[in-house]
Amino acid sequence: MASGESHDSVVLQFVQCTNSNRDIAEAYLSKSSGDLNVAVNAFMDDVAALVLAPPDPSRPSASSFTVLTWNIDGLDPGNLVERSRAIEDFIRRTRPDVVLLQEVVPTSLAAMRRIPGYLVNAPRAEIQSYFCAVMLKLDTVRCRSIAVDDFEGSEMGRYLLTASVDLCGANVFLLTAHLESTVNRSTERKAQLARSFAKMRECGYGTCILGGDLNLRDAEARSVGVPDSVHDAWVACGEKLDRKYTWDRSVNDNLGPFQPRVRCRFDRVYVGARIEVVDFDLVGRERLPSCDRFPSDHFGILCTFQVD
């Protein structure tokens, strides 16, 4: 059980992930000492022993997988239910293997937990007002462990969330963070980026993926220095200008009137040498008819990868 999470919360997550019931959840959690990941994996193993699942036609090959990372702007209370539902619907339609979310709040977390077939890990959900979450598609990804590393210098409760998973026959390390915000917190943000790269090094670089709202300016990335064994997914996929700016006030007016010159690549994805970037796209660029707003003030990043 993640620190700070109540037993009832873990039971509910098990039921939602497995489409089972409370009695089954209690039984598996009891056998796994309350560890949600262990309990869900045990349940899925038992199901797999009874039923041979058909192949997922959305997967191009056994070595290909998709990752969505998105700051979903839960701190904006405006149209939060509609915007959360739109993100929920997008995940239901596209079924990414991995979803990395930042700026999640209870309302948006409840929407994500309604999506069947995903294990939703949000270790700080019970103790912080907004937080990161990792969603893993149960029929393609097996979770080994979840770890939280606090950024000691953060004034905003920021941390690095790392999931060790089995994916496409490899042990893949999924890292997400919402690095320190605002211009005047650049020094701390660079320290957090350096710590994130250090975590990738600790995990061996090769099958690591770091994705999130890193709030990065290009000068900060250059100052910290991207390790030789790590690649920027947007750069690796051709540096397409129409997919560059994830926080683009020239087209996204969720925060107020258009500002044509305010365009930033705050959200980034960095990958290790064994991860090949097949596709890199921005999502959430359509207005919602119900409220005439975008799902978030950030556009999400949807990547297709292959693992060597």
Image: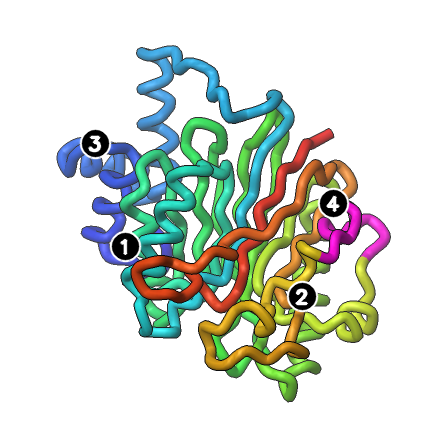
Amino acid bearing label 1: Ala
Instruction: Name the residue located 21 percent from the left edge and 32 percent from the top edge.
Output: 20
Residue 118 locus on image (x, y percent): 38, 39
| Badge 2: residue crowd in 10 Å (few <14, some 14–19, many ≥20) | many
What residue lies at 26% left-to-right and 40% top-to-bottom? 16
Label 1: which secondary element: helix
**Sequence-earlier tag: 2 or 3:** 3
At mark 3, the secondary structure is loop
Residue 167 falls in image quadrant: top right
Q: Which residue is mark 4?
A: 272
Q: Earlier in the sequence, mark 1 or mark 4?
A: 1
Task: From the image, tell me which residue sits under label 3.
Answer: 20
Q: Are marks 2 and 4 in contact (CB under 8 Å)?
A: no
User: Which comes sooner in the sequence, label 4 or label 3?
Assistant: 3
Give the magenta range: 227-241
Give left or right: position of 176 versus 288.
right
Q: Are marks 4 and 3 in contact (CB under 8 Å)?
A: no
Q: Residues within 10 Å of mark 3 (few under 14, many from 20)?
A: few
Amino acid type, callout 2:
Arg
Q: Position of residue 193 (x, y in %)?
A: 68, 67
In the picture of the structure, the residue carrying the numbered disc 2 is: 265
Residue plotted at (34% across, 43% down):
35
- Residue 81 appears in the figure: yes
Q: Amino acid at mark 3?
A: Ser
Q: Secondary structure at mark 2?
A: loop
Question: In whole angstroms, how far apart are the C-alphas of marks 3 and 1?
Answer: 17 Å
Q: Which residue is mark 1?
A: 110
Please tell me whether mark 2 or mark 3 is closer to you in this view.
Answer: 2
Dot 1 crowding, Cα within 10 Å, few <14, some 14–19, many 20+: some
